[in-house]
Image (cartoon, coloured by chain):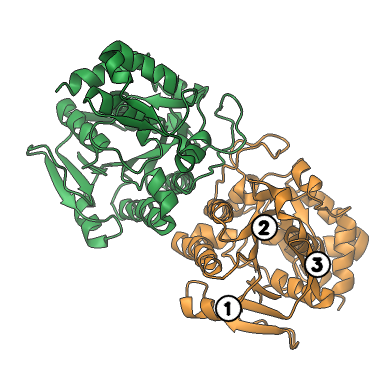
Chain colours: A green, B orange
Amino acid sequence: MKVVVTGGSGFLGQRLIRALVERGTLQRNGEARAITLITAVDTMRAADGLSEARVRYVQGDLADTVVLAEAMSGVDSVFHLAAVVSGAAEADYDLGMRVNVDGTRALLDACRAQPAPPTFVFASSVAVFGGDLPEVVLDQTIPAPQSSYGVQKLIGELLVGDCTRRGYVDGRAVRLPTIVVRPGKPNAAASSFASGIVREPLAEEEALCPVGPETRLWVMSPAQAVRNLTHAHETPSAAWGRQRAVSLPGLTVSVREMLDALRQVGGEAAVRRVRFQPDERIAKIVYGWPARFDAMRAQALGFTADTDIESIVRVYAEEHAR
Amino acid sequence: MKVVVTGGSGFLGQRLIRALVERGTLQRNGEARAITLITAVDTMRAADGLSEARVRYVQGDLADTVVLAEAMSGVDSVFHLAAVVSGAAEADYDLGMRVNVDGTRALLDACRAQPAPPTFVFASSVAVFGGDLPEVVLDQTIPAPQSSYGVQKLIGELLVGDCTRRGYVDGRAVRLPTIVVRPGKPNAAASSFASGIVREPLAEEEALCPVGPETRLWVMSPAQAVRNLTHAHETPSAAWGRQRAVSLPGLTVSVREMLDALRQVGGEAAVRRVRFQPDERIAKIVYGWPARFDAMRAQALGFTADTDIESIVRVYAEEHAR
C-alpha cells in the first residue's frame, strides 16, 4: 500500500514515517497490508530525512496541483499533518487560510480523483475549542474556536466529514493535545514554550515562559501522538459512524508540574534556566485553550494517553541526550 | 449608509430590499442611519427589480473580484443571502464549495479591505444540524451537518465568527428555518416541496409531496425572515458576544398541518391537488433536518417567530391572489 504523509519533513511527520517503516504494515479496512511506499510531502526538505528505499520526499506546496498529483498517484492512505501553526495563523490570516484550509481542500480533491477512497487521517487540534468552556470539555461540548488556527482546523474537520459522507475518503480527524516535548528549535506555535521550558534547560540553555506557573495544558508525548495517529488509521470505519472527529485523551499538566518533572530529570539547575516573562499575545491564545477533557469517545475507540509528565520528560531526555 | 445585499435578485433578497427601501433607515452601532444606496449583487438579474433611485443592481459572481470591488466600494452593511441551495449543493459539490464557501470568503475579504468593519448579516440555515439529533435542538447542541449545504453554511458561520474576532467585520449569522411559502417556481432546495404543496394548489396546479404527511419541518414566513434579518443587523454587537451565530425561533409544522392550513384557506379542492410521491433523495436530506428548537438565545436577542401556519398560508394567498 502507498501512504502519503503531509508535513512529512516536520518533527511529527518524520517520527510517524520512522514508525511506519519499522512496522512495515498498516491495518486498512480490517486487513494488514504491507507498506510499499511512503511519500513525504513538505514545503521544506527534512534535515535528516530517512534514507530508505520505501520513503521518497516530494518538496512543494499542497496548493500546487502538479506536486500534489505526483505525490498522490495511486495513494491508499493519507496522514495529513501539514499546517501553519497557531501563532503564525493568527499573525497571518491569509497564510493560515491558504495552507490550513485550501491545502486540506486540495488534498481532499486529490483523494477524490483516486479510483477508490483513500483512508484519510487528519491531525486536528484541541484548539477547535475555545471561549466560555466548561471545567471539563466533553464530547458533547460545542467547538467554538477563538483563534484562526482553531477555526481552520475545525473547517478541515468539517471537510473531512463531508468528503467521507460523500465517499471521497474514509476520513478520521484526531484532535491532538499540545505535543510535549518537541525537539529542535522553538516555532511559531503559541504552545512552543511548553516544549521550550523542558528542552532548552536540558540543553543547558535559558528558556522563557510567557505564561504563569498555574497555566494548565492538555498534553501528549510525540510517541503517544504517533501511536494515536496510526490507531486512527487502523480503527474500523464503522466504529466512527457519522462523526469523523474525536478529541484525543491526554494529560492535564500545569507549567509548575512540568517544572517539577524537569527538576526530577534535570535537577534544580535545569529549572533555574527557566525565566517567566509574560507575553500577552501568547497568553491570550493559550488561556483560551481547554486544559481538561473527558475523552470518553476516544477511549471507546481505543485511543490512549500518556501516564505522567515525568515519564514524558524522562523519555525526551534519554532520546536527546547530548 | 450603503448596504449590499447578495442574492439580491432572489425572492428573499428582493423582499429584504423592498423592506429596506420602505424603512429608509437602519440602526447601526446604536444609531439610526439613512440608507442612501442599496446594491443588489446577484448572478441573475431580478425579473421585477425595483425601479428606485437608491437601488442599483450589479450582476456577476462573488468570486469575480472586479464585480465585488465595484459592489462593495464604501459599504457599511452587508446582507449575505447568496447561496447554492441544499439540493444543488448536494448534487454538485464543487459548485456548492465555490459559491457557498469561496463566495462567502471573497465577500469577507472585500469587507476587510474597507476602511471600517462593515456590519455583516449572514443567512445561515438550520441545515447546520443533522445526524443523531435530540428531540428538541438547543443552543448547546453541536452542529453536525449531514449535507454539503449544511457543512458549507457552518463553514460560513465559522469564517464570519473569525473575521469578527479579527475586527474585519461585525458579523451576525442567523440560522434560518425553512421559509414557507416561497412564491415563484420550485427550486433545487430539498425543502422546495414545502412551499410547493401550498403555492401550486392555490394557483390551481398539482403539487408533488416527496415526503410523508407526518414529516415535520421548522418553518418561518418570508415576512418574518426579513424582520429577523433586519433585527440581526440592528442588535448591538456586544449582545452577541463571542458566539456570532444563532438558531432563529420558528414553528414546528407537519406536512399534514400544512395541508390542514391549505384546506382552511383554499378549500378541499386545493388539498386534493397535492399528490404524495416519495422521493428517496429528497427524503434523505429532509429527514436529517431538525424539526424542533428551543431557541432561547435568539429570543433573548429579540428574534421572533410566526404565530401559526394558517396565518402564513393566508398571508401568502392574499399577497399572491390571482
Choose between A96 and A153: the one closer to the eye: A96
Which corner quadrant of the image does residue B24 belong to?
A: bottom right
Q: Please, which chain is the residue tagged with disc 2 on?
A: B
Q: Could you say whether the residue bearing mark 3 is in a helix, strand or loop?
A: helix
Choose between B81 and A197: the one closer to the eye: A197
Q: Which residue is mark 2?
A: B191
Q: Could you say whether the residue bearing mark 1 is in a helix, strand or loop?
A: loop
> Which circle, 1 or 2, is nearer the viewer?
1
| Residue B256 placement (x, y as % from top left) | 81, 50
> Which circle, 2 or 3, is nearer the viewer?
2
Residue, x 47% and y 49% (percent of image)? A148
Q: Please, which chain is the residue tagged with disc 3 on?
A: B
| Residue B233 placement (x, y as % from top left) | 73, 61
| Residue B68 placement (x, y as % from top left) | 53, 76
Q: Which of the marked residues, 2 or 3, is nearer the chain's N terminus?
A: 2
Q: Residues within 10 Å of mark 1 (few under 14, many from 20)?
A: some
Q: Quadrant of the C terminus of chain B?
A: bottom right
Q: Which of the marked residues, 1 or 3, is nearer the chain's N terminus?
A: 1
Q: Which residue is mark 3?
A: B201
Res B73 label: 1
Q: Which of the marked residues, 1 or 2, is nearer the chain's N terminus?
A: 1
Choose between B171 and B141: the one closer to the eye: B171
Q: Above or below — where is A156 with respect to B170?
A: above
Q: Above or below — where is B149 with respect to A218?
A: below
> Which circle, 1 or 3, is nearer the viewer?
1
Q: Residues within 10 Å of mark 2 (few under 14, many from 20)?
A: many
Q: Could you say whether the residue bearing mark 2 is in a helix, strand or loop?
A: loop
Amino acid type at mark 3: Pro
Q: Please, which chain is the residue tagged with disc 1 on?
A: B
Q: Above or below — where is B112 with respect to A129?
A: below
